[in-house]
Each structure stands twice: as structure tokens, then as C-alpha cells.
Image (cartoon, rainbow, N blue to C red):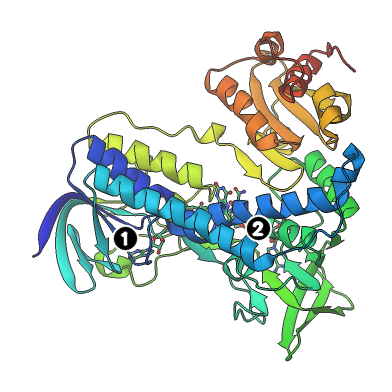
Amino acid sequence: MSDSFDAIVIGSGPGGYVFAIRAAQLGMKVACVEKRATLGGTCLNVGCIPSKALLQSSENFEETTHHLADHGIMVSEVKLDLARMQARKGEVVSANVKGVEFLFKKNKVTWLKGAGVITAPGKVSVDGVEYAAKNIIIATGSESMPLPGVEVDEKLIVTSTGALELDKVPERLVVIGGGVIGLELGSVWQRLGAQVTVVEYLDRLIPGNDGEIAKQFERVLTKQGFKFKLSSKVTGATKSATGVTLTVEPAKGGAGETIEADVVLLAIGRRAYTEQLGLATVGVATDPRGRVITDAHFATNVPGIYAIGDVIAGAMLAHKAEDEGVALAEILAGQAGHVNYGVIPGVIYTWPEVASVGKTEEELKAEGIAYNVGKFPFTANGRARAMGMTDGFVKILADKRTDRLLGAHILGPDAGTLIAEIVTAMEFGASAEDVGRICHAHPTLNEAVKEAALAVAGRALHI
Ligand code: FAD
Ligand code: NAI
């Protein structure tokens, strides 16, 4: 036995690394096992951070090529240096992953480099060296969901990981899946010049989000140049030297068609990743979707083994994983760690952005909860007009009887930042009237949130 710890967390993504830091702050001797060459997991290496770097760069390109002229700024000969754009993305990732390494050193968290296997309760083997731990935390994250008949090679048929690495703008990019990854990374390549076609199984985009927002979002993206094939499924992919031929059929059956693509992005969801972790050996129970089953305190069925993040049920989001990491560390330290799952925001970092928190109108209807709705369009917001970014609206849902906030859904400029106000209000159990009565600086985009809150009681001022 090489060494022993209070806690060993397997995986250094937002769940694992944040758990490690918080547990160390609380006085535990902690190790984190990571098999990737750098810390930070999917999020920092091949997820949130590189995608946001490319979204920012491509947004700057789009703004320069298409929108600066509206402001009277004439530029000519704008050129894309994709190699530089990719290099910058690499620098952003590198700064972030090194940041986690620094935080580990600062908090005296030991990085055990290699693949971790749980060999018995209280025992983790890392590349053959065994370590003991009072508590073992599974934070191994998720991986891209495969689709039979569509073989990923990360060159012609890519997952998000390959889509972040393309060294040439594809002329025709076909995205399978009209969800978060498909629309974010589709936006990157569309802005840089690709013709993007999205094939989505359902009759709508971004399932799980508010339907009215999704419909408007589809219109805005169509205006930007996206093509959508809804209610359609890909049944096969044939590769040639130059591209891919996809067979696409109506979701409910019927005559199919073929679509030619230079690159295909497969983005139909992610699944829990527990490969070669030893779960079967130690008897950790998983659900039919392969996710580790936990109780309300993140405990698995095996005493001393816990799980957090994408590998357990719930939204596959970095901030959800982080909050679970903090909560579990506090629970193990004897404190009252807790995650409020009803108030976890979700953001899609396209332009405009989509942000949501709480219940959708569809959910409220299904649950038979009576509600009032208030809406306010960005066309009526002075700041949005000044920015020239008036697509979208704010929608607020509040309990019909008590006026308590139940949910908010925003399509618009900087929606991801705007939603934080409602998240805070909901954490404090605020009513729509509370938000409507708060003084909001003028002229700001946040005034649209205030106006939507006022609109819940039919008293918006500027529409
Ligand atoms: P992960 O981040 O997946 O980390 C798990 C780590 O465990 C990995 O580094 C893996 O190498 C390691 N590991 C696995 N098994 C072993 C083992 N046996 N031994 C050692 N190490 C092991 N979420 C957001 O909230 N906002 C976003 O903007 C966002 N953008 C995204 C963009 C993309 C393209 C993708 C793919 C995802 C995005 N996500 C985003 C989702 C986010 O990345 C995940 O929710 C988050 O990373 C989950 O964190 P985690 O700690 O559970 O697992
Ligand atoms: P997703 O669940 O968001 O979207 C998948 C889409 O594919 C859905 O619309 C689904 O109906 C569709 N689909 C499923 N099977 C299909 C098929 N056979 N043919 C056509 N369409 C099909 O999953 P996605 O985009 O892969 O993202 C995975 C996860 O990563 C998400 O759960 C999300 O939480 C996380 N993520 C979060 C981001 C953010 O917070 N901004 C950014 C990127 C990813």
C-alpha cells in the first residue's frame, strides 16, 4: 500500500477538482486521480472552455464581416486565420488547466496521474499502485453518445472533440442532433463560412427548454443561415475520400433522402462514463442508462463510495457538478451540504443566447400548477436597440396564487448573464413583483427582466 487519504476522487473535471479543493479546505487529506495529461476534465479540456473560446472568436469574425457596417465602420479584406484562432483556443485551455494544477498545489491536493480502478471498498489502484481512502468519490464524467451506422473517426465524422479541432472550415457541415452541442458548435462553423444543416429527431430544437423560446430560436438561427431537418433521423453514413453521404429518413418512417457533407458532427447527447472503473467488482449499482445510482447525499449502495457530476442522474452541466462537489465535501466533513436542483440555470452560448431556470410552461401545465406569465421583447429595450441586438424576449413564470417565481426563460443578448438575477431571486423565494420593484440601472439589458416581471401582473411600462 503506497499511501492513504481521507478522500480519493477519481476524475478531475468540475465535479472532481472542486470536490478536492473544498475537501482540502475542510481539512481532509485528498488525492485526485486523473488519466488525462492535464487536469480539468471534459469541461476545461474539450468542453465548456474551448467551445466558448471558439464561440467568442467566431462571434468577433461574424461581427466584423457582417455587422460593423451597420455602425458605419467599414472594413475590407477581413481574413480568417483559422490556425491562429485554434492556437488562441489552445492558449485559453492551457491557462485554465494550469490554473487547476496551481489550485491543487495551493490546497495540497495530490494529483495521482493515471487511470484509477476501484479494487475494493476503500482501495483505489492507479496504474497498478494501490492507495487507501476512507472515502472514494466517482467523478468520471461522461462521453459522447454513439449512433449505430455512424462511425466516428474524429476527422470526417466527429464528436464535439473533433469539431473543436477542425483545421479547415467545412463547406457543408451536417449536425446530427439539434441540442446544445449541435447548435453551439454549429454556430461556430456557420459563422466561419460553413453551410450548416441540422438533422433533429424531434419536431423541435433544444428539447427540455421552453417551447416558445425554442420556436423563436429556430427562426433566428434560420435567419442566420442554418438549415433544419426536424422530425428526421440519420440511418446510415458512408464515407468517401472527400466526404460523407448520410441517409436521412422521417423519424416516424417513410421515404428517405441522402445528404452530402464534408464533415458530420454527431451530437445526440452524452452518457455516463465508467469504463474500467471496477464498479462491477465492488458492486456499485448503476441505472439502465449506466449512471451511478446515488442517494440524496451522493452515496452509492457501497458504503464509503460516492458519486457526483455527469456520471450520476441530472443535468450534465459543469456548475451542477461543481455544486455537487462542494456539497459532498461538506457532507463528508459533517456539515449540511446541499444542492437546490430546482434552481440550476442552463445556458446555450449561441448568439443570441438561450438561458433558463426553473420550470418551463410545458412542465407547469403537465404538473397542473396555475401560473401567470410575463413577457418582454428586446425590441422594446433601449440598450438592445443601441447594441443592434433586438432578437428575442424574456419570459417569466410566476405562481398564480402567490406570485412566487417558478421559472424564467430568456432568448437574447447576454441571456446567460441576465438569468443570474432570476436565479438569485428564486433562491431567495422572491415573487415576480419583488423583481419588478427592484431598481434596475438604465439603459441595461436587465431592464427587460424587470419589465417581464412587471408584465406578470400586466403592468409593464415600456410596451
Ligand atoms: P468531466 O468533466 O467529464 O471529468 C471527468 C474526468 O474524469 C475526465 O477528465 C476523465 O479523463 C477522468 N476519468 C474518467 N475515468 C477515469 C479513471 N478511471 N481514472 C482517472 N481519470 C478518469 N457545461 C456547462 O455547464 N457549460 C458549458 O458551456 C458546457 N459546454 C460544453 C461543451 C462541450 C463541447 C461539452 C462536451 C460539454 C460541455 N458542458 C458544459 C458539459 C460539462 O463539460 C460537463 O457537465 C462537466 O464537464 C461534467 O463534469 P464532471 O466533473 O462530472 O466530469
Ligand atoms: P442534447 O441532449 O442537448 O441534444 C441532443 C439532441 O439530439 C436532442 O435534441 C435529441 O432530440 C437529438 N437526438 C437524439 N437522438 C437523435 C438521433 N438519432 N437523430 C437525430 N437527433 C437525435 O445533447 P448534446 O447537444 O449532445 O449535449 C450533451 C450534453 O452536454 C448536454 O446534456 C448538455 O448539458 C451538455 N452541454 C452543455 C452546454 C452548455 O451548458 N452550454 C454546451 C454543450 C454541452
Tell me the CA gap for discs 2 and 1. Answer: 30 Å
Q: Quadrant of the C terminus?
A: top right
- Residue 182 in picture, x, y percent from top left: 70, 60
- Label 2 secondary element: helix
Which image quadrant is residue 171 in?
Answer: bottom right
Say which quadrant the N terminus sits in.
Answer: bottom left
Q: Secondary structure at mark 1?
A: loop
Label 1 residue near ligand 1, CB within 8 Å: no
Residue found 48% across the figure and 54% down from its top: 44
Asked whether the viewer can see residue 293, the reply is: no
Q: Position of residue 306 (x, y in %)?
A: 31, 50
Q: Amino acid at mark 2?
A: Ile
Mark 2 or mark 1, which has the lower sequence index?
2
Question: Is the CB–ligand 2 distance for label 2 below 8 Å?
Answer: yes
Q: Is residue 155 above or below residue 340?
A: below
Image quarter for ligand 2 equals: bottom right
- Image point (51%, 57%), residue name: 91
The residue most toward the left is 1
Q: Position of residue 241 (x, y in %)?
A: 73, 91
Report the number of numbered marks. 2
Residue 145 quadrant: bottom right
Tell which of 357 and 114 is nearer to you.
114
Q: Which residue is mark 1?
A: 284
Dot 1 amino acid type: Val
Which residue is labeled 2 in the image? Answer: 181
Please determine whether, in this image, residue 433 is positioned above or below residue 391: above
Mark 1, Cα crowd under 10 Å, few <14 / some 14-19 / many 20+, is some
The residue under the point 87% across, 15% down is: 462
Dot 2: within a 10 Å radius of its alpha carbon, few (fewer than 14), some, or many (20 or more) residues? many
Residue 263: x and y, percent?
72, 76
The residue depicted at 69 percent of the width and 16 percent of the height is: 432
Between circles 2 and 1, the one closer to the viewer is: 2
